[in-house]
Image (cartoon, coloured by chain):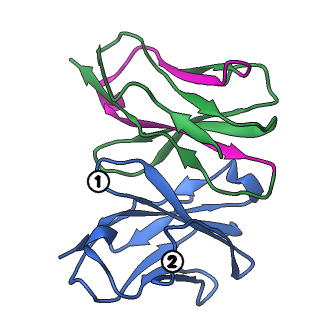
Chain colours: A green, B blue
Amino acid sequence: AQTVTQSQPEMSVQEAETVTLSCTYDTSENNYYLFWYKQPPSRQMILVIRQEAYKQQNATENRFSVNFQKAAKSFSLKISDSQLGDTAMYFCAFISTQGGSEKLVFGKGTKLTVNP
Amino acid sequence: EPEVTQTPSHQVTQMGQEVILRCVPISNHLYFYWYRQILGQKVEFLVSFYNNEISEKSEIFDDQFSVERPDGSNFTLKIRSTKLEDSAMYFCASSDRVAHTEAFFGQGTRLTVV
């Protein structure tokens, strides 16, 4: 079974600085997708960034980038130039593209606070 | 921008009552999902639905739960006899392909069972 682990329950960063959120996962499969979702206080789930396992290049979306280390099964999220609006829960998630499973498997989340 | 819409945003119900949570997926999407998040915990998969039938469900999705797409636009989750432990945030999601690499989530329905 796939598992996703986020080892940092809470983190804080000063506005305009950079922060990295950690995520590791466990799977025996070779093809899969990884995601970071943001959940602000409104509790809506918002897709931040995704990475396809067969792509070696790390995904980037504006201030958000990932460090995908497939051999280490690590998928960290870097937020540059942090903004107050980045304050939220961040969930790392995994989905397999094999075996017919269609469910996202989520980590427990990291609560990020951006301080002014 | 197309979005997944869920109603109501908050539902309070008495233990033992039936509730129906409603979702309007994005119109050209074919795959639909329900997830739940108990307060302070991680998001958990409940069920996936494609071509008018359940394609996968978790152990949480027992006989008290059912899903339906009654009219081609709405996608509903019914809990027949609610328990206190059903209190959670329920998220609907939809995508246009398998392995929902483009999954979009609704804003969630907060269910409180008293």
Residue B10: x and y in percent read 27, 70
Give the distance between the C-alpha atoms of the residues marked 1 and 2, in whole angstroms. Answer: 20 Å
Which residue appears at 50% of the width and 33% of the height?
A5
Q: Which residue is mark 2?
A: B62
Q: Secondary structure at mark 1?
A: loop
Residue A29, quarter of picture: top right
Which residue appears at 30% of the width and 68% of the height?
B85
Q: Is residue A28 magenta?
A: no
Residue A1: x and y in percent read 65, 46
Q: Nearer the viewer, residue A12 or A63?
A: A12
State the residue lying farthest toward the left: B114
Please state which of the two labelled residues, at mark 1 or mark 2, is closer to the viewer.
Answer: 2
Q: Which residues are magenta?
A: A70-98
Residue B98, quarter of picture: bottom right
The chain letter under disc 2 is: B
Which residue appears at 64% of the width and 43% of the height?
A2
Residue B43: x and y in percent read 45, 52
Q: Is residue A76 magenta?
A: yes
The N terminus of chain B appears in which quarter of the rendering? bottom right
Residue type pointed to by label 2: Asp
The chain letter under disc 1 is: B
Please indicate, yes or no, whether residue B17 appears anywhere in the rendered image.
yes
Residue B66: x and y in percent read 52, 83
The C terminus of chain B appears in which quarter of the rendering? bottom left
Whether residue B32 sits left or right of residue B39 in the image: it is right
Residue type pointed to by label 1: Leu
Q: 10 Å neighbourhood of mark 2: few (<14), some, or many (≥20)?
A: few
Q: Nearer the viewer, residue A60 or B11?
A: B11
